[in-house]
Image: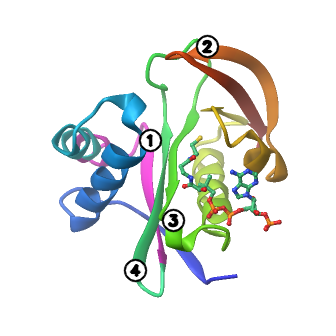
Amino acid sequence: MTNVQTFIVEPGTPELAICARWRANAFPVLQASFEDELRSLELFASDQAHGVALIAKADGKPIGTCLLVETEIEPNHDVSPWLAGLFVVPEYRRKGAGAALVAAIEDQARQREFSRLYLYTTDAAGFYARLGWSVLDRTNWKGFDTALMVRDL
Ligand SMILES: CC(C)(COP(=O)(O)OP(=O)(O)OC[C@H]1O[C@@H](n2cnc3c(N)ncnc32)[C@H](O)[C@@H]1OP(=O)(O)O)[C@@H](O)C(=O)NCCC(=O)NCCS
């Protein structure tokens, strides 16, 4: 198990570009370029009242990211808030970083006094189930068979 720490991504920091690069490459379904991602993350990070972007580091090096957002992109369910955009770099997977980012986003939601948190996943339902999440519904989201999952906080 690697020593993973999570931090809030602040506007104007180089970490925004790192997260934007990961997001543009890892989530082609979003059809957003690096520049698109950078712009929207910069805006997002500058208003932490409505959500937060986290970055995970191991040995001082950025290894992953996750967001707490009010609204998923084109949601099929009228629920809020959402855990979104979880990503860990391949060479640091299966070392606890994903679980650490999920726990940190859950904490951010608790700090904002939410009692439930939601997410969509196409192929990581097993990962989230191990972390205490349950499948609430299934839906066709952007053409993919997708689970709506919930976590009571
Ligand atoms: C999904 C992802 C974030 C997991 O990150 P990770 O750092 O490897 O996760 P962890 O090491 O914290 O794993 C926690 C547990 O879940 C298990 N696990 C990891 N990925 C899994 C998966 N895809 N399915 C089922 N279980 C999984 C691990 O074995 C571990 O269990 P253990 O503690 O008993 O060994 C990572 O694989 C990733 O970035 N994938 C690409 C992007 C993605 O699919 N994001 C999710 C979008 S909804």
Q: What's the residue type where badge 1 is placed?
A: Gly
Q: CA distance from mark 1 to mark 2?
A: 25 Å
Which of disc 3 and disc 1 is earlier in sequence? 1
Q: What's drawn in magenta, residue-wise?
A: 42-57
Which of disc 3 and disc 4 is earlier in sequence? 4
Q: Which of label 1 and label 2 is nearer to you?
A: 2
The residue depicted at 80 percent of the width and 29 percent of the height is 135
Q: Position of residue 48 (x, y in %)?
A: 38, 46
Q: Are marks 1 and 4 in contact (CB under 8 Å)?
A: no
Circle 2 Cα neighbour tier, 10 Å, few/some/many (<14 / 14–19 / ≥20): few
The residue depicted at 66 percent of the width and 74 percent of the height is 95
Q: What's the residue type where badge 4 is placed?
A: Lys
Q: Which residue is denoted by mark 1 in the rendering?
A: 51
Which label sits on residue 127? none
Helix, strand or loop at label 2? It is strand
Which label sits on residue 90? 3
Quadrant position of residue 31 = top left
148 is within the stretch colored magenta: no
Mark count: 4
Which label sits on residue 140? 2
Q: What's the residue type where badge 3 is placed?
A: Pro
Circle 3 Cα neighbour tier, 10 Å, few/some/many (<14 / 14–19 / ≥20): few
Q: Are marks 4 and 3 in contact (CB under 8 Å)?
A: no
Q: What's the residue type where badge 2 is placed?
A: Asn
**Image quarter in which the N terminus is found:** bottom right
Pointer 3 residue Cβ closer than 8 Å to ligand 1: yes
Q: CA distance from mark 1 to mark 4?
A: 24 Å
